[in-house]
Amino acid sequence: MKLNLALAQINTVLGDVPRNLEKHLDYIDEARKSGADLIIFPELSLTGYVLQDLTPTVAIHPTPSDPVFSKLLEASKAIDIIFGFVEEDERNRFFIASAYLSAGEILHIHHKVYLPTYGLFDEGRFFAWGNEIGAFDTRFGRVGMLICEDFWHASLPYLLWLDGADIFFFTSASPGRGLPAGSRCDEPARLDSSRWVDDINRAYAGLFTSFVVHTNKVGYEDGLNFWGGASVFDPDGEAVVLGPQHQEALVLAELDLNHLHRTRARLPLLRDERTALVQRELTRINNSRNSSN
Amino acid sequence: MSAELSIDTKLARKILTGFIQTEISRAGFKRAVLGLSGGLDSALTCYLAAEALGADNVMAVRMPYRTSSQDSLDHAQLVIDALGVRSLTIPITEMVDPLINRFPEMENRRKGNIMARERMIILFDQSEDFKGLVVGTGNKTEILLGYSTLYGDSACAINPLGDLYKTQVRQLSAAMGIPKPLIDKAPSADLWTGQTDEGELGFTYEQVDKVLNLLIDQRFTPEECVEAGFAEDFVRQVLTRVRRNQFKRVLPPIAKLSNRTIGYDFLYLRDWGT
């Protein structure tokens, strides 16, 4: 079975949901015309990233009655869509959220669990922490979604894997940082942050014998740059596609889902995973004096 | 140059030209104004701005004082000729001397600050006339050391070089093909005859950039810098300069009275809505 992806590494207008929605609809249209089954937008693709006090003003309720959400639900009748937004829940908490829409329905919404609040990041000041992780079923099989800092904690991809995800959809608004020393001539110049993300995604693909798909924002917000560089790694950890750095693009990739069968026949890491041991040891560690959490 | 300070110049160039282009257009402009001193920082800024916006959209302003060296004017002209940017020469002597002459005892530092602030007035006036934003030329070394005049040469709308140490400015300048006399000469604010940055600071950029990189970027403690081979006095001196000049790197604190105060709990990027 084949899955055709369109990775939309887009720039955004900071805090202007209607203009960002317009861009989403344009990209969705282009992806549909290219024959894609699913389009994936970056973290906070409807709003931009450094929202600070704009957060409450750009939040939406992910329901069919919301004028923005309804347009994306309608568009999902032609092509599956993953996009990023600020969700305000019924008790007025604000979450960094990703939605998976298909055939006019919401299949899943993920709330970002890990909010980086250190260094240049200040998410914990403005957002509520998500509290759940779960894989979900799509017409292409069982998948999972994580947002940026979520996948810097190995436990979350691991949980999705055990929960049945064979394709991981990761989205980011990753600020570019770390100018490397002179570039190697065999590969294009890229920032440390870009290399770090690809390194761990390649590792997850290999460790979990799964597909790992990543879409990241591009453009600038004040002095921050966002590096794009969408990627897909196959269950052997090989790159299926690597998008351009620092420029908007709709990156197309065809996934051969039978690859999962071939890799796992060779390398039965999932079969041999000892979850009861993990649970037993986690319980022991959490109950011990040495536990850090 | 030490390996830690070496940078991928191609990538830096791409990100910085993208930054200039994006941040100027988001503010509703397409042009830039900058002061071209004849030194390396402003030359590099001019090269980056010309590449980002097109030479015709860049106004380079030379603003000599009567003691400014001819080399400074000539080197600035090399940049103007090489890039084909627009240019103006506005001498500041007749503007600043009336103030300077009122205080016969005035020492060089005061005079230098007056000159830097006069140049700021000219650039922001040209900004209005040319409909371009003032692009700053300060680098990370001088911002950290506070080696600038507040509301003078540090005043600008955007600052592309502020995260590059002086030695990295030299590296990027060489990669962009800036004329060699500008790269080779001793850095100077040229505020008085014979002034050089390194003479005034008391250490070389090569030395201080290595220590700043350890202290700031690598988060070394002062003790670890000494262990790494730097003189203790030097490390302390640098750290003191960095700390004492924090005031130049932040907006003036506002006394909080209300429930929502600018700077504390009124938080928006400048790119808000763009």
Image (cartoon, rainbow, N blue to C red):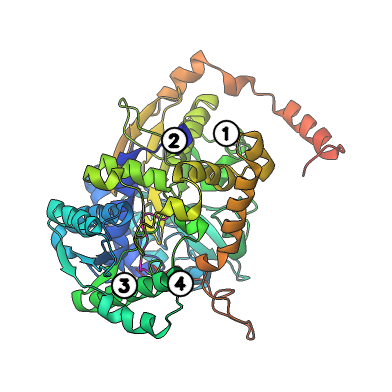
**For mark 4, what is the residue?**
B107
**Which numbered marker is on residue A195?**
2
Q: Is residue A192 above or below residue B97?
A: above
Q: Is residue B96 above or below residue A13?
A: below
- Residue B97, image x, y percentages: 32, 80
**Which numbered marker is on residue A46?**
none
The stretch in magenta equals: B156-162
Q: Chain of mark 3?
A: B
Please name the residue shown 39% across and 43% down the image.
B168
Q: Amino acid at mark 4?
A: Glu
A155, B258: nearer the viewer: B258
Q: Amino acid at mark 2?
A: Arg
The kind of secondary structure element at disc 2 is: helix
Report the label total.
4
Q: Are marks 4 and 1 in contact (CB under 8 Å)?
A: no
- How far apart are the two marked residues, 2 and 3, measured between alpha carbons? 42 Å
- How far apart are the two marked residues, 4 and 3, measured between alpha carbons? 19 Å
